[in-house]
Image: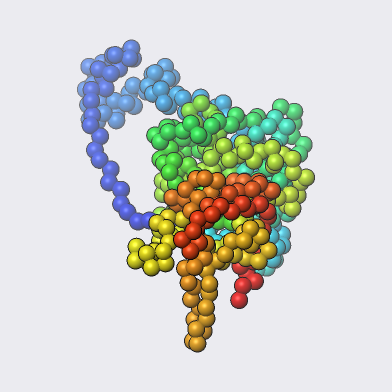
Amino acid sequence: MNRTLSLLALTGSLTVGALVGYDIRDRALNQGVPAVTSAQAATHTATSGEMVTALATTPAAETRARTESEANTVQVVKARQDGLVYISVTESDTGSAQAQLRERLQQQLPFDFGLPDEDEGGQAQTGTGSGFFVTSSGDIITNNHVVEGASEITVRLHGSTKTYPAKVVARAPDFDLALIRAEGLPQGAAKAIPLGDSEGLDVGLKAIAMGAPFGLDFSVSEGIISSLERTVRVGTKGVEQSVIQTDAAINPGNSGGPLLNSAGQVIGVNTQILTGGIGQSAGVGFAIPVNTVKKLLPQLQAGKGGQDAVIQTPSLGIQFAPVAALTDEQREQAKLPEQGALVAQVYPGSPAAAAGLRGSTVTTGANGQRTAANDGDVIVAVDGQPLTDAGDLPRTVINKQIGDTVTLTVQRAGKTREVKVKLAAFDLAAAQNQQP
C-alpha cells in the first residue's frame, strides 16, 4: 500500500568511493566501436565521462555497451511487464474492517503496513498496491493487507489507463496473501507470470522488483537476494515466518508485487521493508517466498468470493516463553531443559487444553502482583524435530491444516512424554482479550 512500512529505525552514513578509470579508447577498439579521432581526442580529453558521451552517439554502440546482466534485466522486464497489475482500493466506512485491521496490526506488529489513511469526516479512503497475474483467466496474487476490508477494488494493466473492477476470491490473512479476480478483461489481456522455486535460491542471485511505489506506475528496481535466513512477523497472527531479504528497492505501493529472478520467474511477493526512519526503502526489503504462494494457491482459487472467504490456520491455543531466554541458574532451579517452549498459559477450549497440556501456575500476592511459577509443560520437540528455536513451534503449527494431528514431545517435572494434539481453528486473540 502507498504508505510507510517500518520494522525498526536504522541510522548510518554512506561513503561513495572513487572509481578507477581506464582507457575507454582501447575498450572501444576491442569491441569494434569506431575509435575517437585525434581531433576528437583534443576536444574530449577533460574527463572520461565526455568520452562516454562521444562513444554513445549510435544505437549500435549503446547496444554493444550493455553488459550481459543488463541485457538479461531488460529481457526479463519486457517479457513480464504485462503480467504486472496496479491495484486501487476504496474503504468507505472508517469504522469497519480497515480500521479494525489497522488497530490489530498496531497491537501485534512493530510496523505499519501502509493501510489507507483514516478520515475523520467519514469520506471514502483510498490506497494503492501491486499484484501480478497467476492465470490467463485473470487471477491476481497480492498482499492481504492491500485488499482486506476494501469495499471496492479496481485494477489497471501495464501501459493502459483503463480500469477494471476486481473481486476478492479468497484471503490468507495469516500469510498476508490474497487472490483477487479481475472482471471484464479483454481476451488475452491477462499475462500470467510463471512461478519459480524459492527453495532453490542462493544468496547473491539477482532479484528484480516490479510495482508502483508511491503510485509511480511500472517502476522496476534490481538488486540481489541479501539473505535467506530472515524471519519476520507476517500476517494478522504475527507469527514469525521465513522471508526473502533483498536490497532491490521496495517502497510503499510495491506491496503485493512480484520479485523475479533472472529467468523471469516469480520467487517472492514483496510485502515489507525497513525504512531506516526515513519513510522509504533503506535497502532492506522482504518478500514472501513463492513456495508459500504455490502451496496456498489451490485453496485460494477454490474460495467462494468476498471478504469472508478466508483460509483459516490452526492454533494450539497457548502462550509460551522460550526456555533459552532464561539464565542457566533459573533453568537449573526450575529443572528445565536447555531448549524448548515453556507453556505459560493454556486457554480453555483450545486444542492444547483438549490434549491435556498445562501452563505455569499463576499466583497473586497481597499487593495484587501476579507471578508465575515455572511448573508448566515444556515442549521440546514437534513431530520428532527438536525445538532449537522456540519460534519454530508456531511456524510449524501455522503451516499445518485444520484437522491435522501433531505429536509434541513434552517434559513435566523431569519426565518426558509424547502428546498428540488434533489441530483446530482457535481465535487466540479473542481468548487473550477475555483474560482479566
Residue 204 percent across, percent down from the top left: 39, 34
Find residue 339 and report its image quarter: bottom left
Q: Residue furthest front?
A: 415
Q: Nearer the viewer, residue 325 or 303?
A: 325
Q: Is residue 429 visible?
A: no
Residue 28 percent across, percent down from the top left: 30, 17
When the figure is inspected, residue 364 is found, relative to residue 61, above or below; the finding is below
Q: Residue furthest bottom?
A: 366
Left or right: residue 91 versus residue 322 is right
Find residue 56 and report its image quarter: top left
Left or right: residue 67 versus residue 361 is left
Left or right: residue 168 versus residue 336 is right
Report the coloring of the rendering. rainbow
Q: Residue at x 58, y 44 (%)?
A: 256
Find residue 429 and report its image quarter: bottom right
Residue 393 percent across, percent down from the top left: 53, 52
Q: Nearer the viewer, residue 324 or 225?
A: 324
Q: Residue at x 69, y 66 (%)?
A: 95
Residue 230 percent across, percent down from the top left: 44, 46
Quadrant where the image shows the C terminus: bottom right
Left or right: residue 9 versus residue 49 is right
Q: Residue at x 48, y 31 (%)?
A: 200
Q: Is residue 376 visible?
A: yes
Q: Residue at x 63, y 69 (%)?
A: 433
Q: Nearer the viewer, residue 427 or 342?
A: 342
